[in-house]
Amino acid sequence: DTGVSQDPRHKITKRGQNVTFRCDPISEHNRLYWYRQTLGQGPEFLTYFQNEAQLEKSRLLSDRFSAERPKGSFSTLEIQRTEQGDSAMYLCASSLLASTLYGYTFGSGTRLTVV
Amino acid sequence: GQQLNQSPQSMFIQEGEDVSMNCTSSSIFNTWLWYKQDPGEGPVLLIALYKAGELTSNGRLTAQFGITRKDSFLNISASIPSDVGIYFCAGYNGGSQGNLIFGKGTKLSVKP
């Protein structure tokens, strides 16, 4: 297992287009988290899943954002009608329920640029 | 919402020097974490602190969980060029959520 995998690493899109990112967590991890990181800031929580259930969404997750984890394994984050303010690094992390913090591992992120 | 104040924002040091950075919060956390992030990569966990007053080391890194549970510091001894990066503190309050609250980071530059 090579850790948390995110695809693509970079995405440039025109304003108004839809984009979708994928996260493959560490295989035995049942919790999966999405964060957003803008330049000069720390990561900010967006949402998390326990298995396939989406249990919490932050206020940062506007109606244009949707996340899924259909089979409790990989997850997708879709942004509809992208805006320039959506430009950021989108980070995925996963952990084991039993050791929520100790195994909390981040992927390398997807860098989104909206032009 | 909860915020973490991390200082300094940036540091420029000579190789071999010791480094100290800290993080304070307006509210209590049950756990403090310290991460390092290299350009274009995700944060990598350095040290986790689970108890007020706890002092934990990981090689040249030492971190402490403040007694008030509202602060934490990270020390790096005898810095080397590969210590360059952005260091983040993160707090966690427990419960069923599992989401972390991050500081804004301390950018460390090391001159050989």
Image (cartoon, coloured by chain):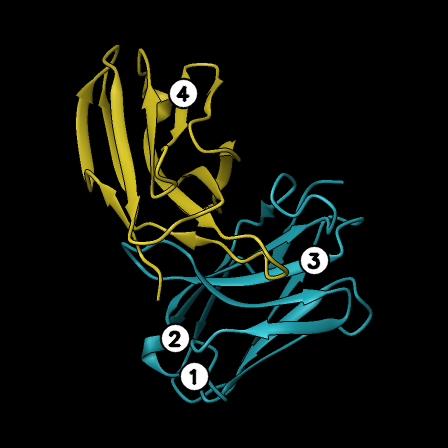
Chain colours: A cyan, B yellow
Q: Nearer the viewer, mark 2 or mark 3?
A: 3
Q: Is residue A14 left or right of residue A5?
A: left
Tell if the residue under mark 4 belongs to the same chain as the one under mark 1: no
Of residue A92 and residue A96, the one placed in the foreground of this image is A96
Q: Is residue A115 visible?
A: no
Chain letter for the residue marked with disc 4 in the picture: B
Residue B12 placement (x, y as % from top left)? 17, 28
Helix, strand or loop under label 4: strand
Task: Indicate the amino acid at tag 2.
Answer: Asp
For badge 1, the amino acid type reads: Thr
> Which of the marked residues, 3 or 1, is nearer the chain's N terminus?
3
Is residue B11 visible to us here? yes
Residue B20 against residue A73 in the figure, above or below: above
Circles 2 and 1 in contact, beta carbons < 8 Å: yes
Give the quarter of the image for residue B85: top left
Task: Select label 2 or label 4 by which is in front.
Answer: 4
Q: Chain of mark 1?
A: A
Residue at (37%, 83%) from the top-left corner? A83
Task: Look at the numbered discs 3 and 4 and tell me whether their residues touch, using CB distance below 8 Å.
Answer: no
Q: Which residue is mark 4?
A: B62
**Amino acid type, label 4:** Thr
**In the image: residue A11, left or right of residue A23:** left
Circle 2 packing at 10 Å, graded few (<14), some (14-19), many (20+), is: some
Mark 4 surroundings: few (<14), some (14-19) or many (≥20) residues within 10 A: some
Q: Earlier in the sequence, mark 2 or mark 3?
A: 3
Q: Which residue is mark 1?
A: A82
Label 3 crowding class (10 Å Cα cut-off): few <14, some 14-19, many 20+?
many
